[in-house]
Amino acid sequence: MTDKPSGRRRADVEINILESFELRSRRSIRESERKRQTRHALRAEKRAAKLDRKHFAANPPSNPITALGIVAAIPKTRFSKKASVRTTLVMSVIAGVTATAALPAYAYGPAITAVSGFTQSGITEIGDAQSMSLLRETALNFERGSYGLMSASEVERMTNRNNYLGYKGLTAIDLASSPNFVDLTSEDILKVAAKYVGTPYVLGGELPTGLDCSGYTRLVFAEFGILLPHSVIAQSHDPHLKRVNRSDARPGDIVIMNNLSHEGIYAGSGMFYHAPQRGDRVKLAPIFTDNYYIVRVIK
């Protein structure tokens, strides 16, 4: 650590500080004096100009051009006093107020609009009464005087939840009671598994409008007449599931994590179909851990 100055060195430092302060003070005094002189000169010029105006006002020349060559001044109108300028400003203010009053009580950014599917093309593609009802219900949350900011992820989550709750189609129970497939083949299982790719993740979901990991496998195998429980733990003990060696795994088997936290449908080559997590969708992806085992669904 640097020692503090002492003795002669300290005295030198103090002298340097005083000299620096004195120089700054002198400079400040000179600048103040120059500013004062400038103000004085400006005031003198203004007084002279005022006296000239009074003189010419009291003694106007008989002709615009006098013997001395002085041209009579033409009075100027201020820019802000011109009738055309004032009219333009008034019309601009009226147009702005009218446009503001015509705005809807809510507005979305491009990212939120794209995610929530509120564009005209999205409405055309969906087109059913259920989706239109969802749009009306969502709009009520943004009525004038009570709206708030929402992120794109929040709007998407709300939209997915509303779509899930508004679903009126077949459930896993309905499909299991009237299955679409008779035999359990790898080809058919993967065909059904791929059909639900893109379905948003909904915690506790087991419908075509929203799925979690165990709800996904439950819905897929319901189309084969097998109703699995909606739980990874419960499925791991279900009599329809038989554990097989990983070397004997074939497409259509179920991949279950060792800690029973997640599962999916094996697609071969280290890949599986699964509903990953909140904010994601059902997709085909690599098995992200080596801590898993394989079970086969049997009738």
Image (cartoon, grey):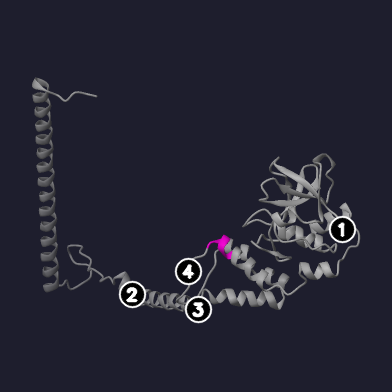
Please name whichever residue, 51 or 96, is drawn nearer the observer in this view of the structure.
96
Question: Which image quadrant: the N terminus?
Answer: top left
The answer to whether residue 17 is above or below residue 296 is above
Residue located 9% across and 28% down the image: 15
Which disc number belongs to residue 82?
2
Indicate which label's residue lies in the foreground, 2 or 4: 4
Indicate which label's residue lies in the foreground, 3 or 2: 3
Q: CA distance from mark 4 to mark 1?
A: 52 Å
Q: Earlier in the sequence, mark 4 or mark 3?
A: 3
Question: Taking 144 as reference, is 241 left or right?
Answer: right
Q: Earlier in the sequence, mark 3 or mark 2?
A: 2
Magenta range? 151-155
Indicate which label's residue lies in the foreground, 3 or 1: 1
Question: Which image quadrant: the C terminus?
Answer: bottom right
Q: Amino acid at mark 4?
A: Gly
Q: Amino acid at mark 3?
A: Ala
Q: Amino acid at mark 1?
A: Lys
Question: Taking 207 as reference, is 100 left or right?
Answer: left
Q: Secondary structure at mark 4?
A: loop
Residue located 23% across and 70% down the image: 64
Question: Taking 60 as reference, is 194 left or right?
Answer: right
Q: Secondary structure at mark 1?
A: loop
Where in the figure is residue 167, as x and y percent of width and height?
70, 72
Which disc number belongs to residue 45?
none
Q: Secondary structure at mark 3?
A: helix
Q: CA distance from mark 4 to mark 3?
A: 19 Å
| Residue underneath mark 4 | 148
Which disc number belongs to residue 102?
3
